[in-house]
Amino acid sequence: RSHFESIGVQSIEVPEWKDEFGKPSILYWNPINLSEKNILFKKSANLSDVSILADIIIMKSLDQDGKKVFKPEDKITLMHKVDSDVLSRISTAMVQAITPEEVKKN
């Protein structure tokens, strides 16, 4: 438990998504846990179903205040009107395991 807690909130800068000041957006998230992975696996009957990328981003994305950035209704927009490479980069970062040593480096 202490290992999981030591990881803390992660973030990624998304230069393709500009904020109202023209600066790259920053998405935050807490480390993914087994319960969340279970939900994602159940949503995707086939793990090669790329819609899981949108599900990850909807589930995990927080703003700097810890509030959800996306709602389930945003899935269609994410799947049809957002660069798939950007979604892939963000969702991969959100599910990657990070060690406490890597956290200390940042």
Image (spheres, rainbow, N blue to C red):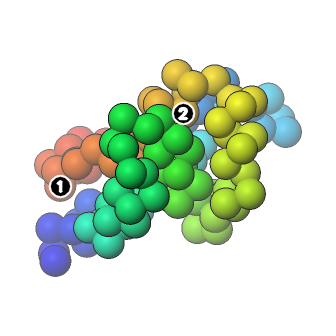
Tell me the residue at 74%/57% (across/down): 73
Q: Nearer the viewer, residue 90 or 79?
A: 79
Extreme front residue here?
45
Q: Amino acid at mark 1?
A: Pro
Above/below status of 25 relative to 61: above
Asked if residue 50 lies left or right of residue 58, the reply is left
Instruction: Say whether residue 29 is visible.
Output: no
Numbered circle sitting on residue 100:
1
Tell me: 3 left or right of 93. Answer: left
The spot of residue 5 in percent (x, y) is: 25, 71
Rendered location of residue 4, percent (x, y): 21, 68
Quadrant placement of the N terminus: bottom left
Residue 44 vertical placement versus 23 (above, below): below
Looking at the rendered structure, the secondary structure element under dot 1 is helix
Q: Secondary structure at mark 2?
A: helix
Q: Residue 86, position in %: x, y? A: 55, 27
Nearest the eye: 89 or 25? 89
Q: In the displayed structure, would residue 86 be above or below residue 100?
A: above
Residue beneath the point at 42% across and 51% down: 44
Image coordinates of residue 19 in percent, x first then y, are 77, 38
Query: Hey, what amino acid is under mark 2?
Result: Leu
Foreground residue among 41 and 23: 41
Does residue 87 show up? Answer: yes
Q: Is residue 76 left or right of residue 59?
A: right
- Other residues around mark 2 within 10 Å, as few (<14) / some (14–19) / many (≥20): many
Which residue does the numbered mark 2 point to in the structure image? 87
For marks 1 and 2 on the same chain, the one whose residue lies earlier in the sequence: 2
Q: Nearer the viewer, residue 80 or 96?
A: 80
